[in-house]
Image (cartoon, helix red, strand yellow):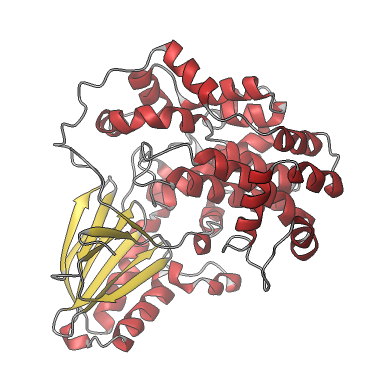
Amino acid sequence: MNPNSKYHVVSGAYHIATRRDITLEAFLGTCVGVAISDPVNGVGGLIHLLLPEPVSQTSIDTPEKYASTGLPIFIQALLDSGAETKNMTATVAGGALIRPISRQDIYLNIGGRTAEVALNLLQSVGIHVETAETGGFTTSCLELDLSTFDTRILPSFDETETRSLSFTPPTADEIRTAVERLSPIPQSVLCIMNMLDEDRFNFTEIADEARKDQVITAKTLHLCNTAIFSCRRRIDSLDDALILLGQDAFYKLIISAFINRFFEQSDAGYSLCKGGLYHHAIGTALIAEKLSEFTQTISPATAYTAGLIHNIGMVVLDQYMANAFPLFYRGLQKKDSNILSVEKEILGVHHCEVGAMLCSLWGFPDNLTRVIACHHTPDAAPSHTDLISIVSISDFLMTQFHTVQELSPLSLGDLEHQLSYIGFSLDRLVELIDMIPIQFFGNTQREPVRLA
């Protein structure tokens, strides 16, 4: 790793290392971060906690997500790495109520309960808490410098930053040109989407269509052997993928391969590092798939696809957002603001409008077009409301409770109202948060964000 590089710890994970020129970081909203170090023995680490305790017995597969189970594992790993409890000091951050604050936020107080469990556990094992800054109303970043074992709790964005305050928004013609310049959707993928929309699930035809595009085939085989679609043996052909993974997973592979190819055209405007939009898309897709299995009103394959492409308009706007970032972030902090109004104010257009332009250009099926155009305003959608609600809630969960690379806080309006569309009550929100597929997002190294 390069000197002064940042190592990003995603929610539901931890990282431990001996003294070196690396800074561990975790971006925290409602999540809670705990940094523990033993400078005497030169060992330190950081854990990023999502919830206070496991929701059910099935949650035990990912114990690092929860303060009650993950923190003991983290502490033991530090001891196994040579740290001693008597030398350990801890810093705790996060657990915020992210604006706009609603009745349900105060009622649930998930972040506050996670912080409380973490602090009580640290006290019970005799680890001194040097600094604890939890609660509040904004996202923060917890850093642990492994060269000095100093910790810092910073706002996610420096309000004093003056970069690009003279930003010139793109013209309507420039936006249209950017849309048209984007690599078009492969015909094979469009055929597959139309098969799904028309309930013609012929997997032989799907495989045949995928073989027509060498890039899609190559990316499909690459994804076969990653954590998201891991199999016990290496997969080297589309036929093997179909046989070993099954039809549903095979379809997801084909669509995910296309989206991966598409999101590679984005950089780091909306996100803290390259790849953030794609991670968000995959997470939203996986949650939407699970919700559809619960509601049984939408096919899981349709829900997965809709979740995967819901923010496709951001790929076009990402190039402009990189320079407009300070204005974008500050706009989101204003009372009653939302991402669409801030985008419109700064860029003259928002990502749902641009996504709809892409849908028209590429001939997307109507149900997917509605999701892309209305996932922030589901009540205004004229049709496909079940699918739009599923994707809206999934998008909300990924943005609000899985602060990884995204810097765009999201309000779904009356969350309780949206949950009722899919048969959930507010009391079951923690179950939904537990659906966030943190096991697929490994920690990542990144260079510091350039702010000048």
Look at 68% across and 49% down and name the residue there: 217
Look at 55% across and 38% down and name the residue there: 262
Which is nearer the eye, 123 or 345? 345
**Left/right of residue 194 with respect to residue 47 in the rendered view:** right
Quadrant assignment, res 428: bottom right
Quadrant assignment, res 226: bottom right
**Left/right of residue 225 with respect to residue 324 in the rendered view:** right
Is 170 situated above or below 406?
above
Is 132 situated above or below 339?
below
Q: How many marks?
A: 0
Q: Quadrant of the C terminus?
A: top left
**Spot occupied by residue 184 in the image (x, y as percentages of width and height):** 61, 29
Residue 134 showing in the rendered view: no
**Left/right of residue 322 with respect to residue 188 in the rendered view:** left
Q: Quadrant of the N terminus?
A: bottom left
**Spot occupied by residue 210 in the image (x, y as percentages of width and height):** 74, 44
Is 391 situated above or below 231?
above
**Left/right of residue 213 with respect to residue 64 in the rendered view:** right
**Spot occupied by residue 363 in the image (x, y as percentages of width and height):** 69, 23
**Spot occupied by residue 137 in the image (x, y as percentages of width and height):** 28, 45
Quadrant assignment, res 170: top left
Residue 203 showing in the rendered view: yes
Which is nearer the eye, 180 or 129? 180
Q: Residue furthest front?
A: 214
Look at 38% across and 54% down and name the residue there: 109
Is 411 situated above or below 272?
above
Look at 60% across and 52% down and name the residue there: 286
